[in-house]
């Protein structure tokens, strides 16, 4: 066996991901040392409750509630606690004590990323975060390094495993939202507070991280347009399939030309959307994630795999750990974050998308013409209309259901069209409005 210098690794958090990192580090220690060129000595695992049951089990002697004592003696600190505080304070302490830091905490990076990267740059430390987006999927390194010579124009993807698991279960087995969320939580996919998943906050944090990296521009979290899946109903899921779509929650980051000026801005958004069944994203099941990247020279690239889960995410953390260890052995400056492009952030209103709108309207002559005029008055052109008529023989008023798919238009024209439809006398209800992507 080769004798290596030992690097001291402190782990903050021994939950779903942390316990799997410990397991892999302890069982594959020799193999990892050979790859890293240094022994990786786990000096301790900071948790809140030393007596809690953990799967896989963590040897008791490694557990402590004193995170700070671990940090001061570490060469590499791995933050897997989640949340903003005390994670931010601990990461800053680690950087300032000269350690490299690995984190899977997208909430922390999307909220305090610039402060943490600046602190790391000041002292020549590295901050690694492959596990923060896409679980096991290598996506940060490809964007940060492999595509550094290209110009990324668009990112389109499923970046939250929990919500994909829920929507897939509702579609494939007719499971309820609540059951599917409980199962995703049991399987370790959901955040400590699953509102982060179902409310689209986790995906928005990941979109902010991806857009900042891809466009070399700091994209703050509050600039990411966000809608979750809490309003998606069983009947919308069923109707989508009948019409040849599935509903997925997407993260879309774009580099957009501003009004034909030759100047560019960037936008980032997260929302549910209808995806045609033939689109590759429609075949992303369970807690898997998939991300398409379009770049000027490289063309279209697709990254696919497990987006959540303890062992899967631990794989990405260990990849970062080996990279950090190699840098300790070889030396060198590492990779700097680049936000030099500093492109303006465009509002959601200027984004181009298309809507599918389901309306109930009174069944009388001239209604279709009224609706068509409303669309054209707002500069929105209609691609397809389907109509189902209720004849009133069952003692209800005669009525018609219209399902309208628009051509591409700005979000602001589409939203004002829906407002005008809702206010018109011929429309008795706006039943559902969903964006359509991937056509
Ligand atoms: N689960 C997943 O699939 C993925 C998770 N991530 C990210 O990885 C990170 C960890 O996630 P996960 O393992 O699921 O989270 P868990 O909630 O399962 O684990 C969190 C761990 O941190 C410890 N902890 C929390 N607060 C403190 C504190 N103040 N002091 C000391 N210890 C603390 C907890 O201790 P105790 O056990 O005693 O309560 C627990 O061991 C998060 O940032 C998450 O967003 C990223 C990708 C995928
Ligand atoms: N809760 C997250 C975990 C990984 O980032 C998800 O479901 O994707």
Image (tube, grey):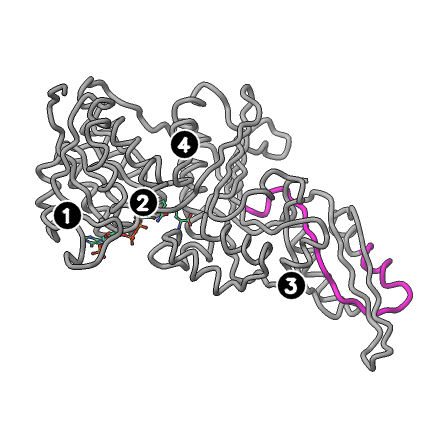
Please name the residue that numbered disc 4 is placed on.
138
Q: Secondary structure at mark 1?
A: loop
Q: Position of residue 126 (x, y in %)?
A: 24, 30
**222 inside magenta stretch:** no
Which numbered disc flags the more N-terminal residue, 1 or 2? 1
Residue 59 tag number: 1
State which mark lies toward you, 1 or 2. Answer: 1
Q: Is mark 3 within 8 Å of ligand 2?
A: no
Task: Indicate the position of residue 32 as horizontal and vertical percent values.
Answer: 23, 28
Is the C-beta of the residue carrying label 4 under 8 Å from the nearest atom of ligand 1? no
State whether label 2 is within 8 Å of ligand 1.
yes
Q: Are marks 1 and 4 in contact (CB under 8 Å)?
A: no
Magenta extent: 348-373
Read off the residue under disc 3. Answer: 235
Q: What whole-number distance in Å separates the C-alpha atoms at marks 1 and 4?
A: 30 Å
Q: Which residue is mark 2?
A: 105
Q: Give the distance between the C-alpha atoms of the residues marked 4 and 3, in whole angstroms.
A: 36 Å
Q: Residues within 10 Å of mark 3 (few under 14, many from 20)?
A: few
> Crowding near pointer 4: few (<14 within 10 Å), some, many (20+)?
some
Q: Which of these two is toward me, 205 or 241?
A: 241
In the image, taking residue 219 as reference, residue 316 lies left or right, namely left
Determine the image quadrant of residue 300.
top right
Which badge, 3 or 2, is on the more N-terminal residue? 2
Residue 312 screen position, x and y as percent: 37, 41
Instruction: State how far apart marks 4 and 2 are (Cα).
Output: 16 Å
Asked if the residue at tag 2 contacts the one at tag 3, i.e. Cβ–Cβ closer than 8 Å, the answer is no
Q: Secondary structure at mark 4?
A: loop
Looking at the rendered image, the quarter that the C terminus falls into is: top right
Circle 2 Cα neighbour tier, 10 Å, few/some/many (<14 / 14–19 / ≥20) = many
User: Which of 2 and 169 lies nearest the eye of the viewer?
Assistant: 2
């Amino acid at each position: 066996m080769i004798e290596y210098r030992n690097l001291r690794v402190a782990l903050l958090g021994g939950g779903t991901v942390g316990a799997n990192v410990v397991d892999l580090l302890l069982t594959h220690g020799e193999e990892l040392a050979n790859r890293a060129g240094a022994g990786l000595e786990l000096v301790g695992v900071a948790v809140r409750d030393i007596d809690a049951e953990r799967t896989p089990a963590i040897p008791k002697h490694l557990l402590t509630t004193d995170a700070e004592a671990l940090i001061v003696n570490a060469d590499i600190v791995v933050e897997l606690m989640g949340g903003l505080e005390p994670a931010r304070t601990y990461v800053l302490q680690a950087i300032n004590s000269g350690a490299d830091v690995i984190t899977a905490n997208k909430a922390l990076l999307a909220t305090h990323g610039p402060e943490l990267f600046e602190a790391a740059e000041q002292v020549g430390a590295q901050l690694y975060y492959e596990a923060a987006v896409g679980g096991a999927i290598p996506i940060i390194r490809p964007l940060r390094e492999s595509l550094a010579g290209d110009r990324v124009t668009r990112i389109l993807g499923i970046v939250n495993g929990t919500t994909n698991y829920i929507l897939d279960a509702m579609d494939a087995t007719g499971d309820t939202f609540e059951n599917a969320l409980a199962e995703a939580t049991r399987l370790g996919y959901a955040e400590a507070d699953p509102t982060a998943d179902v409310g689209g906050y986790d995906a928005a944090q990941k979109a902010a991280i991806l857009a900042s990296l891809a466009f070399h521009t700091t994209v703050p979290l509050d600039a990411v347009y966000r809608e979750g899946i809490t309003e998606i109903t069983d009947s919308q899921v069923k109707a989508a399939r009948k019409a040849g779509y599935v509903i997925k929650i997407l993260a879309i980051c774009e580099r957009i030309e501003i009004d034909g000026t030759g100047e560019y801005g960037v936008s980032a958004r997260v929302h549910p959307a209808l995806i045609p069944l033939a689109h590759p994203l429609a075949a992303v099941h369970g807690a898997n994630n998939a991300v398409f990247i379009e770049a000027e020279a490289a063309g279209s690239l697709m990254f696919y795999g497990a987006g959540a889960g303890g062992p899967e995410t631990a794989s990405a953390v260990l990849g970062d750990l080996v990279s950090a260890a190699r840098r300790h052995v070889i030396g060198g400056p590492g990779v700097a974050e680049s936000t030099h492009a500093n492109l303006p952030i465009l509002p959601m209103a200027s984004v181009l998308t298309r809507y599918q709108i389901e309306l109930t309207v009174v069944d009388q002559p001239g209604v279709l013409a009224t609706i068509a005029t409303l669309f054209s008055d707002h500069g929105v052109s209609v691609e397809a209309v389907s109509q189902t008529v209720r004849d009133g023989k069952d003692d209800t008023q005669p009525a018609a259901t219209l399902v309208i798919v628009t051509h591409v238009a700005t979000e602001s024209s589409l939203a004002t069209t829906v407002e005008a439809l809702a206010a018109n006398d011929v429309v008795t209800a706006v039943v559902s409005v969903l964006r359509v992507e991937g056509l």
